Amino acid sequence: MSKRIEVRDLNVYYGKFKAVEDVNLTIEPRSVTAFIGPSGCGKSTFLRTINRMHEVIPGAYVEGEVLVDGNNLYGKGVDPVLVRRQVGMVFQRPNPFPTMSIADNVLAGVKLNNRRIAKSDAEALVEKSLRGANLWNEVKDRLDRPGSSLSGGQQQRLCIARAIAVEPEVILMDEPCSALDPISTLAIEDLIEELKTDYTIVIVTHNMQQASRVSDKTAFFNIAGTGMPGKLIEYDETATIFSNPAVKATEDYVSGKFG
Amino acid sequence: MTATLPPRAAADPQGAGPARVNSYTSGKLPRWAAPALTVACLMGAIAVVALLAAAGAIGEFSLVLAVILGTVSAIALITTISLIAEGRRAATNRFMIALVITAFVVALLPLVSVLSTVLVNGAPRFDLQFFTWSMRSVIGEGGGALHAIVGTLQITAWATLISVPIGLFAAIYLVEYGRGPLARAITFFVDVMTGIPSIVAGLFAYALFALIFGEGVRLGFAGSVALSVLMIPVVVRSSEEMLKLVPNELREAAYALGVPKWLTVVKVVLPTAAAGIITGITLAIARVIGETAPLLIVAGFTSSMNYNAFSERMQSLPVFVYTQYANPGTDVDVYLERAWAGALTLIIIVMALNLIARLITRLFQPKAGR
């Protein structure tokens, strides 16, 4: 179900401003890859280019190629809607749909696309997705309550359930734990560990312990200064990045000397 | 600044006496001071004015003068006392609060006055006959406004049917799709349209329908077109504001699930903003339902029933009120009473609309919280 992501010579722009410059990397299927780096270095921006969410912002565009199993996402005539059905995303702040119940939130990907689904299939999908997000036991008695009635950590897991309900190949997570307490964070980290067996996961995080705990490979991004484009400095096995990085800036960052 | 601090700053925080005083409350006027002072000032002012009147200094007793005098003296007195007892910051606070309350009461006065006047004068003819009769062949007593009520409801309903789709779609375009000069132009002209005098809307509708049906045309539907010219900008403006309030995160959440943009708008953005949009539409209806001038021109006036907005003249409540007032027969009071009853009916319809909007708002509101 999961797929390999290859990024070639990628430049990302907001209008005239070049936000990310010359990124080349390959993400293996069924692995967790963490993006770390100081604020504003373009890691979130880069993450959003992997499912074409970047272009939702007016004036934003991309040069280069992002290949998912060899297919270029930025080729001519590619429908971003189809891309996003295969590359799901979880955002920094939990954002369940306020007009929908918990169950409807999980089914959002189906229902919002006007696809018909049998009631029994829908129930099965809700249970499977919520179990997949480690949320089933907490909400099984109140599936018809509004999604906003849950706690922040539960809401974030609801958003993950919503993302896996559409059965994507890849899940992107943009600082999924930055608004959560340590216990909810732990729940989500365990979940990432489990999801790894089925999905390719890319996670942006500011928490270096988190990156070292959950990820197989880590990419370090940095900027030379404000107004300069962000660059991929180093990309390697997580253990190497945190113990024996090749670049001085990486070592300084992971050891807390700056940033 | 330290020199102007009130003595409470020096109070012993431990409290000397057995009944320990909270140092944060010392040196403050009690809660009842301001209201009590206000009542006293108003009574005093009434007494003074009454005395002056009795002495023949100002002619007749005037309640308005007394209230103005009482209010001004109350504000001055409260501020002064507070300045002495509580210090400058508290005095400024009390002065501003007094001004705000006064402004609130002044704003409320005309509303209460209009409502009570219409209630008192409209009640005598607010009877069954008023809602079951038209004015056909009625000279003098009796008669009713059924034809006008039906006309108002039909004309407004058609106006709403025209305005809501146009206004809502325009707002969706502006918020979700519009970029660049076209969107700016639409925003500009919508703002211009908000200021169009209603008589101009009436003349526009008349000119439009005169092109099709020839001069002298009078149609209920032409009235609806005129009203929709006034209504569309209000709907666009309010819907636009409501759509802008929908957080971008929800749109992104839907996009990330592979939902196309139009479905995101239809199924995420609109339901989230539904409550506000409906309130805005109701306010827009309330804004046009009382319009007289355009309907006078294009819908005309009649004393007969007309259930068909697409043929012949159609009476509406504001025009009914106007004709009853402007062309009374020999028995003037009968006509005026009908006019008041018509006005009362109109106000009740608007109130009912607002209540319905509140109800709908509550039903559609995203269920918040735990």
Image (spheres, rainbow, N blue to C red):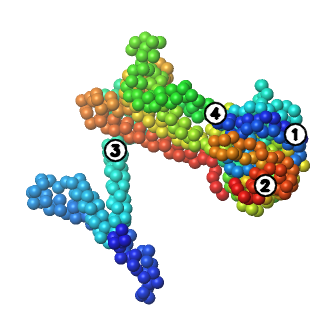
Q: Nearer the viewer, mark 4 or mark 1?
A: 4
Mark before the other along the chain sequence, 2 or 1: 1
Chain ID at mark 2: A
Counting labels gives: 4
- Looking at the rendered structure, whether the residues under marks 4 and 3 are on a common chain is answered as no
Residue behind mark 2: A251
Mark 3 is surrounded, within 10 Å at the Cα level, by few (under 14), some (14 to 19) or many (20 or more) other residues, namely: few
Q: Residue at x 58, y 48 (%)?
A: B362
Query: Tag 1, which chain?
Result: A
- Name the foreground residue: A59 vs A253: A253
- Residue drawn at x 75%, y 55% is A252
Q: Is residue B246 above or below residue B305?
A: below
The mark found on residue A16 in the picture is: 4
Q: Which corner quadrant holds the N terminus of chain B?
A: bottom left
Q: Earlier in the sequence, mark 4 or mark 1?
A: 1
Tag 3 secondary structure: helix
Dot label at residue B114: 3
Q: How far separated are the C-alphas under marks 4 and 2?
A: 32 Å
Mark carried by residue A4: 1
- Three-letter code for the amino acid on which mark 2 is drawn: Glu
Q: How far, Cα to Cα, is label 3 from label 1?
A: 73 Å
For badge 1, the amino acid type reads: Arg
Kindly report the distance in space between the C-alpha atoms of the residues bearing marks 2 and 1. 28 Å
Viewer-proximal residue among B273 and A217? A217
Residue B267, given in percent of the width and then of the height, sits at 68, 38
Viewer-side label of 2, 1: 2
